[in-house]
Image (tube, rainbow, N blue to C red):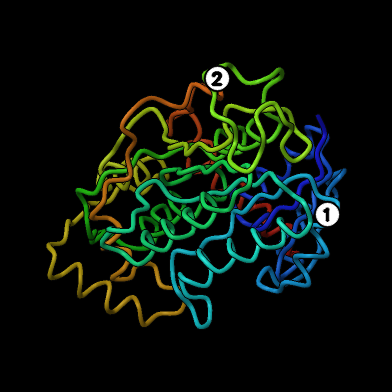
Amino acid sequence: MAQRVLVLGGSGFLGRHLVAKLSADGHDVIVLTRRRNRARDLFLLPTVRVVEGDPHDSATLARWTANATAAINLIGTLHEHGRDTFERVHVDVPLALVAACRNAGVSRILHVSALAASSEAASAYLRSKAAGEAVIAESGLGWTIFRPSVIFGRGDSFLNLFAKLAQMFPVIPLACAGARFQPVFVGDVAECIARALIGREGPPRPTDPAPRGAASGSSVGGSVNDDTIGQRYPLCGPKAYTLEELVNYVAETSGHPRPVLPLGPALANLQARVMELLPGPLLTRDNLASMQHDSVCDGPFPRAFDITPTPVEAIAPEYLAPLALRSRFDTFRSQSGR
């Protein structure tokens, strides 16, 4: 069932993969972004329109939610910068989007949060993510929330970061080396969101609760009744790693094996304080606080999506291996005329 979908954050890493998937599935997609040029690779996708606008602006949201059947919020940030605080990005955007959806009659909303989000988390990032989830869950709309662990794939800012560090430095000093992650492939996350959007055929089972804000047996946002409405889904890959294990794997796979030097709490805090002063910081004290919470799932991948999660080892060598890196640099050089 084709939908007309408004996507916030569609120009980001996950967003580009999701928008391509939605387009391939035949949905009409509006990507709202503050900087249209950042979404250039989406311009040629059929059924996709990239528009420039501020997702905080009520008039802008009102314009683009009109006639939409669903909205997807992917907007997030790991670092506060200027006006873009965690509160503004992770709470105010969902508030504005929910208000626009209500006014436009859009009753289906999908939202991407973070795996360890909690109002009692040690970090402001995770607390703000939890607050954003609460906005969505209390909206009265037909909502679904996704809580992925760290997302990997070509163009990611996680594994690629460590590959660059391994290339630049002979030793990698590592804060929170024992923090645990269960990386999930970007294609799997995009597939889950796309499948939740179209729902399943047929009426709900007798034991299914009616979606909040919708009568039992009714359609939500132009889609059929769906088991995913009113659900939170943790999304993880098949294997958990310590951060040190991931960094060692990335360094070896990229052709730059390096010794890793785990830092104690005091040195890790000092490292974060120094890096916070840099533009586009690699690490902040709030990041350290986030890593006090393991980003791993308690159970298997959600059965609702019928997906076998993809392991890091099946994908990462395609973009981290020396030959893959050289090919990418050759492409850059050819495009720049060098």
Q: Which residue is mark 2?
A: 306
How many other residues sit within 10 Å of disc 2, few (<14), some (14-19) or many (≥20)? few
Hey, what amino acid is under mark 2? Asp
Describe residue 316's horizontal placement relative to residue 305 as left or right: left
Which badge, 2 or 1, is on the more N-terminal residue?
1
Please state which of residues 257 and 215 is positioned toward the viewer in this rendering: 215
Task: Measuring from the top left, give residue 13's x and y in whole percent.
Answer: 59, 52
Image quadrant where one finds the N terminus: top right
- Give the residue drawn at x 18%, y 57%: 261
Task: Measuring from the top left, give residue 133's x and y in whole percent.
Answer: 48, 53
- Looking at the image, is 63 positioned above or below residue 330? below
Q: Which residue is mark 1?
A: 43
Task: Measuring from the top left, give residue 86's x and y in whole percent.
Answer: 45, 70
Describe residue 119's horizontal placement relative to residue 204 as left or right: left
Q: Which mark is residue 302?
A: none
Task: Measuring from the top left, give residue 259's x and y in whole percent.
Answer: 22, 51
Q: Nearer the viewer, mark 2 or mark 1?
A: 2
Mark 2: secondary structure? loop
